[in-house]
Image: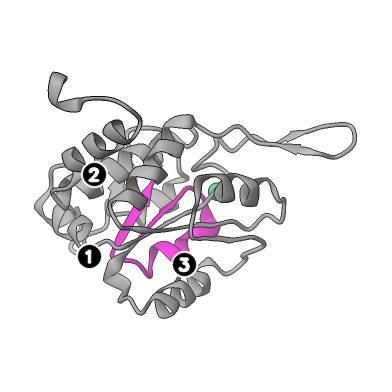
Amino acid sequence: MSASGRVPQGERSSLGGQGLTARARRVRLLVMDVDGVLTDGRLGLSERGDEVKFFNAHDGVAVALARRAGLKTAFVTGETSTVAKARGDKLGVDKVVLGARRKGDVVESLLTELGLPAEAAAYVGDDLLDIPALERVGLAIAVADAVPEVRAAAHMVTRAAGGGAAVREAVERILKAQGVWRATVHAYIREHGGSPERWR
Ligand SMILES: [Mg+2]
């Protein structure tokens, strides 16, 4: 880690780092970019121009766990395709912002709307448009295959690449720092008919 607490280019942050845990503990709002974070960044186009994106089901459960733990969630994308909106709505994401070219401003408005300080936000990104948002939050997260400039601006770099359940990893890190991971997972399993106490 550099003096500023950011991860130097090409270097993985220590996932068990004290500073990182303190940052994760304060998070109340989780903001995610879509292409390259919730997807692997590839865009499928049909002859008719319909867009296809592939989301990771593990990230879908991660959003459910984050919400269950009381975090607010948001998708912020520079794209205007309604695919992200459909995915966000399906997962019950609190806010989906399409066509965001100034993501730092979007994050600031979300914080103002929720009455939260910058330290209470985490942002997961992969490309240059995400940097202004990463600079404004308490916990800046880059996916493993983010561009070097984004990894350099992050406090944490996930082991997983975009579309490879990187958001699941981020949510696990945050909820573990907050001491609610186990209870949240157990509640989720119970809600779906399981008995977590039987296997612990
Ligand atoms: Mg992206």
Which residue is disc 1 drawn over? 4
State which quadrant residue 42 falls in: top right
Residue 11 shows up from this direction: no
- Number of the front mark, 1 or 2: 2
Within-10-Å neighbours for mark 2: few <14, some 14–19, many 20+: many
- Which disc number belongs to residue 173? 2
Residue 132 shows up from this direction: yes
Separation of residues labelled 2 and 3 (CA atoms): 23 Å
Q: Do labels 3 and 1 touch, CB within 8 Å?
A: no
Query: Tag 3 or tag 2, which sits nearer the N-term?
Result: 3
- On the picture, is 196 further left or further right than 81? left
Whether residue 99 is in magenta: the answer is no
Query: Tag 2 or tag 1, which sits nearer the N-term?
Result: 1
Dot 1 beta carbon under 8 Å from ligand 1: no
Q: Residue at x 27, y 70 (%)?
A: 119
* Percent x, y of residue 54: 60, 32
Q: Residue at x 25, y 36 (%)?
A: 185
Separation of residues labelled 1 and 2 (CA atoms): 21 Å
Image quadrant containing the C terminus: top left
Is 114 rendered above or below residue 24? below
* Percent x, y of residue 96: 57, 59
Front-lying residue, 3 or 68: 68
Which residue is disc 3 drawn over? 132
